Image (spheres, rainbow, N blue to C red):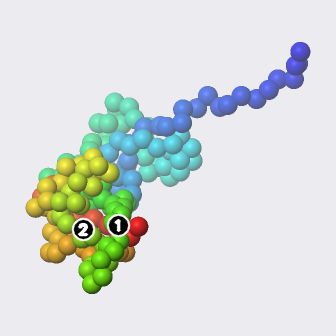
């Protein structure tokens, strides 16, 4: 029988909910409740007083700022930050055309992009909201302008030939 006590895992939750006391880029606005790892909250956010633990008194002390109270520049920043297209790349593959004198790949149209966005991101985007002037015929990286929730945005598209 093993008589030496073994160390176990710490009884600390992996995630902790905190309320931001000021705006932090890539995390959120003042008064927003976010979930972060316990170590990041304990060793950085709480230590530098950038956040406080979630409680009723803290919720009253740091109310969330509504989007109507923000300046237009701050509103655009929040909307851009909430776009699912900021960090994600839409990956598409096209077969090469074997016919001589034709395009190297089958063209990518608005409808193709709309279907792929629905499959990959589970976001319904109407073909009219994709501001593509003409079909994409060249493999490579492309930035496609779109309208997401009525606001202009960009969709990063990676097109590869197979």
Nearest-to-viewer mark from 2 and 1: 1
- Taking the spot 41% from the left edge, 67% from the top edge, the residue there is 162
- Say which of 140 and 13 sits in front: 140
Give how far across and how far down residue 7 sits, in percent: 76, 29
Residue 76 appears left or right of 104: left
Give how far across and how far down residue 50 sits, in percent: 44, 51
Q: Helix, strand, or loop for circle 2?
A: loop
- Taking the spot 35% from the left edge, 41% from the top edge, the residue there is 33
> In the rendered image, which residue does mark 2 sit on?
108
Decide: is 129 above or below 135.
above
Residue 137 appears left or right of 127: right
- Taking the spot 35% from the left edge, 56% from the top edge, the residue there is 23
> In the rendered image, which residue does mark 1 sit on?
95
Give how far across and how far down residue 103 sits, in percent: 27, 79
Tell me whether circle 2 and circle 1 mark residues in contact (CB < 8 Å). no
Sooner in the amino-acid sequence: mark 2 or mark 1: 1
- Say which of 60 and 40 sits in front: 40
Residue 142 appears in the rendering: no
Decide: is 17 above or below 160.
above
């Amino acid at each position: 029988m093993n008589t030496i006590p073994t160390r176990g895992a710490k009884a600390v939750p992996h995630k902790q909910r905190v309320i931001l006391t000021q705006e932090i880029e890539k995390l959120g606005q003042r008064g927003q409740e976010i979930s972060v790892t316990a170590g990041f909250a304990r060793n950085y956010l709480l230590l530098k007083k950038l956040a406080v633990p979630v409680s009723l008194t803290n919720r009253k002390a740091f109310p969330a700022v509504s989007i109507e109270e923000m300046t237009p520049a701050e509103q655009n920043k929040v909307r851009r930050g909430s776009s699912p297209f900021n960090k994600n790349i839409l990956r598409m593959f096209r077969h090469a055309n074997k016919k001589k004198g034709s395009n190297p790949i089958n063209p990518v149209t608005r409808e193709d992009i709309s279907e792929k966005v629905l499959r990959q991101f589970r976001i319904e985007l109407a073909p009219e909201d994709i501001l593509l002037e003409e079909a994409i015929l060249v493999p490579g990286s492309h930035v496609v302008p779109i309208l997401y929730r009525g606001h202009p945005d960009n969709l990063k598209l990676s097109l590869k030939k197979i």
